[in-house]
Image (cartoon, coloured by chain):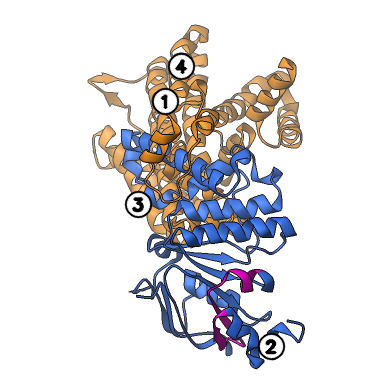
Chain colours: A orange, B blue
Amino acid sequence: MSKVEVKQKATSKWVCGGVNEHQRRTAGHFWQRPITNVAVLALLLACLPLALTSGFHYHLAVLVGINATIAISLNLLMGYAGQVSLGHAGFVALGAYGTAILSSRYGWPVPLALVSSAAGAALIAFVVGRPILRLKGYYLALGTLGLGMIIYLVISNEVWLTGGPDGMPVPVLELFGGRLTGPADWYWLIAVMLLLVFWLSTNLIHAPLGRALRALEGPEAVAGSVGIDVPRSKLLVFTLSAAIAALMGGFLALYAGFISPSLADFLHSIELALMVLVGGLGSVVGSIIGAALITLLPQVLTVVEEYETLVYGLILIGVMMFMPRGLLSSIIDLWRRIKR
Amino acid sequence: MSALEVISLSKEFGGVHAIEDLSFNISPGSVHSIIGPNGAGKTTLLNLITGIYQPTQGEVRLFGDSMAGMPVHARVMAGLGRTFQTPQVCMHMTALENVMLGRHIHLDGRFLPTALRLPRILSGEREARHRAAELMEYVGLADYLNDEPGSMPYGALKRLEVARALACEPKLLLLDEPAAGLGASEKADLTGLIEKLSGAGLTIVLVEHDMKLVMSISQHILVINYGQKLAEGQPTEVRRNPDVVAAYLGSAV
């Protein structure tokens, strides 16, 4: 495009030419495009079963997939919009219990129960989000922590509905006339969910809406000064994040076949936040890596037997100390250094 | 029609009158400065105009429209752009992305089109990138496009804010102490930039301490003290006003 064309195209009165060079320098590379990322992940997910040799491997892959999807949803909130949540497991549990209660106690079709629970959790997030998201920093962390604890308490005390601390069974998921029973069936379902949420998140990030969300992490005056409705944007990402977490919670319940209040436990929230932190705040790919690490580490560490928890803790401390920006960016930095 | 009308505006903070019954008009297309000693209420006034504070009494009108009860972001949509006294930029974004942020109100930020990545989102992004690059060049930051704000000099950050504010396509631009912390040559560049913007028809409101800058580029000056209007008029009149000299300028000017 010549300078003259640029001038004609632009409608602003503050026009100046010569942006060809800028455009070339600032346009994303092929491998940075959202669609490329989605295609690569799809390929990886399609090829992964080649490495999965037993039912147990599939089981782990399903757990990683579910956790990765939840971690991505939490990362949208924490990493991109900069709003800490220490109660995210509460939404996972809402989705799980909603699905279980609606289908087994009230006889709803399972898919309908699943979607309704996610919608219900989103509604709760929408209603509770407005007051909670007025809080900032530590206070927001405590506010979300409180929210998670309330959900935990309700689930463990309303025995008539949830079975209380004993937990409750969940019916088997039937989809397209078939019953999903084995981990291998579940693998493909969860892979599709992970891919969908990954696609949605990358679309969100590489768009005006995503940039507006990322601005929330900066000085709050900035967002307002460019016309971003700060409370509304926070509420949007909080609700979206809760909806995804609840949906995956529903899947988790259906996959496990049995749920207990520990789903809503504070430690579960911490674990989810850890996945995001370890993978890297503000990195969707990082969340998948973080979720894989936090999910698989305890399995791998069974080799050190009684020292498992100790080594687990040391590894986490090490990651946080030496890779504060998360595993993914540290790996990329290392790769660059080696290449040079 | 006035670009900005402030009508008997008052703001109290627990009995302290930060702004008291203040009225003034700003005509379109001019450079209008608001000056006053420290604690005179300039920042409060700015916060009332931009909507960070809601007034105790009175109202602000932008191009004839009342801003009463309107939150900050809605005023931006009504044509109000601003920069900050100390540059407020998103450190985790590149300089260009910071300016692209300014395109927000002109882009489609709805959830569903974004989630489905409709063509309008892609074309909006391209347009935003293009315009942001143009504006950065316009304010003299063509060399900083992909830089992180953390590595940019202070003066460049102030320009970056101007570019971001311009990206909103405001009808009125509020500059909060744009010259603070700048060196002599940077100040000269800034003066040139303000004149260029004013020449393009933009209404500019300047809150500034640098008297040389204020006197040289303003068509109109408002002096406030103790939250009230002390004087108003052309630079030459204000400079001669004995109240202003006593309260603010000192005997040297």
- The percent position of residue B156, horizontal first and vertical second, equals 65, 50
Please report whichever mark, 4 or 3, sits nearer to the chain's N-terminal start.
Answer: 4
Subunit bearing disc 4: A
Residue A302 included in the magenta stretch of the image: no
> Which residue is pictured at 44% across the width and 23% down the height?
A38
Looking at the image, residue A295 lies above or below residue A96: above
Q: Which residue is mark 3?
A: A123
Q: Which residue is mark 2?
A: B245
Disc 4 crowd rating (10 Å Cα; few below 14, some 14-19, many 20+) is: some
SS for callout 2: helix
Between tags 2 and 4, which lies in front?
2
Pick whichever, A295 or A290, lies toward us.
A290
- The amino acid marked with disc number 4 is Leu
Q: Which residue is mark 1?
A: A195
Q: Which residue is mark 4?
A: A45
Pick whichever, A87 or A138, lies toward us.
A138
Find the distance from the CA under tag 2 to the CA under tag 4: 75 Å
Please report whichever mark, 1 or 4, sits nearer to the chain's N-terminal start.
Answer: 4
**Residue range highlighted in magenta:** B213-234
> Which residue is pictured at 59% across the width and 79% down the height?
B235
Pick whichever, A52 or B74, lies toward us.
B74
Q: Do callouts 2 and 1 point to residues on the same chain?
A: no
- The amino acid marked with disc number 3 is Leu
Disc 2 crowd rating (10 Å Cα; few below 14, some 14-19, many 20+) is: some
- The amino acid marked with disc number 1 is Leu
Disc 3 crowd rating (10 Å Cα; few below 14, some 14-19, many 20+) is: some
- The percent position of residue A171, horizontal first and vertical second, equals 33, 31
- The amino acid marked with disc number 2 is Val
The answer to whether residue A87 shows anywhere in this view is: no
Q: Are marks 1 and 4 in contact (CB under 8 Å)?
A: yes
Subunit bearing disc 3: A
